Image (spheres, rainbow, N blue to C red):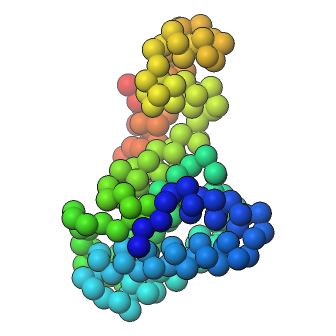
């Protein structure tokens, strides 16, 4: 059973506002999908999948206040699930990590889980940027506006906008290298 992203996001927003019924319904839906997600990656090991579902649900509960309604809910959930899976793998609790290329279950019916996870990672990186750089990158790289159009929207000069994009992308590259263990090298 798949659920519309809009419906799941609405349940999460209600849950953040204290609606326990919405929160219970949301967790029940998410729990089923997470179980399939983990079991497929653990060669059908239902016990380990169940353990990871519980760890992920606890993390969702602990971090529910950090969910931003402007973000994709399913990307946020699967990013947490992926981190729990990787953590278990690193701790040696899982011997075989087998990502599937076909028929990946998604909460919103989107089979392209890797794209959803990449969006969540990108959103996290973008949130660490100053607002001006984040806006400049979103307008030019995500929305596809020209530098002139984006500069007009932001009330900036074209050269200021280009500098914001350049500095923002440089900071993102540096953070990516750091997260991949590449240290704090100078970005070009």
Q: Is residue 170 above or below residue 101?
A: above
Q: In terms of image quadrants, where is residue 65?
A: bottom right
Q: Residue at x 24, y 72 (%)?
A: 98
Q: Residue at x 35, y 89 (%)?
A: 46
- Quarter of the image with the N terminus is bottom left
Q: Residue at x 42, y 68 (%)?
A: 2
Q: Is residue 142 left or right of residue 43?
A: right
Q: Is residue 162 above or below residue 98?
A: above
Q: Is residue 185 visible?
A: yes
Is residue 111 or residue 120 the one in the foreground?
111
Q: In terms of image quadrants, where is residue 27?
A: bottom right
Q: Position of residue 112 (x, y in %)?
A: 32, 55
Q: Is residue 39 left or right of residue 186?
A: left
Q: Is residue 169 visible?
A: no
Q: Position of residue 55 (x, y in %)?
A: 52, 80
Is residue 163 or residue 11 the one in the foreground?
11
Q: Is residue 165 above or below residue 71?
A: above
- Quarter of the image with the C terminus is top left
Q: Is residue 61 above or below residue 139?
A: below
């Amino acid at each position: 059973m798949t659920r519309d992203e809009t419906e799941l996001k609405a349940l999460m927003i209600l849950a953040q506002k204290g609606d326990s019924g919405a929160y219970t319904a949301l967790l029940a839906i998410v729990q089923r999908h997470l179980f399939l997600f983990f079991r497929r990656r653990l060669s059908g090991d239902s016990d380990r999948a169940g353990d990871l579902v519980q760890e992920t649900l606890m993390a969702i509960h602990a971090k529910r206040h950090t969910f931003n309604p402007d973000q994709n809910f399913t990307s946020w959930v699967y990013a947490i699930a992926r981190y729990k899976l990787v953590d278990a793998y690193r701790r040696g609790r899982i011997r075989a990590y087998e990502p599937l290329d076909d028929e990946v279950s998604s909460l919103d019916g989107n089979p392209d889980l890797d794209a959803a996870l990449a969006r969540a990672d990108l959103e996290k990186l973008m949130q660490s940027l100053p607002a001006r750089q984040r806006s400049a990158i979103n307008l030019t790289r995500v929305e596809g506006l020209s530098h002139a159009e984006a500069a007009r929207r932001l009330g900036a000069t074209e050269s200021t906008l280009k500098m914001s994009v350049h500095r923002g992308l440089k900071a993102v590259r540096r953070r990516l290298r750091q997260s991949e263990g590449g240290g704090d090298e100078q970005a070009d």
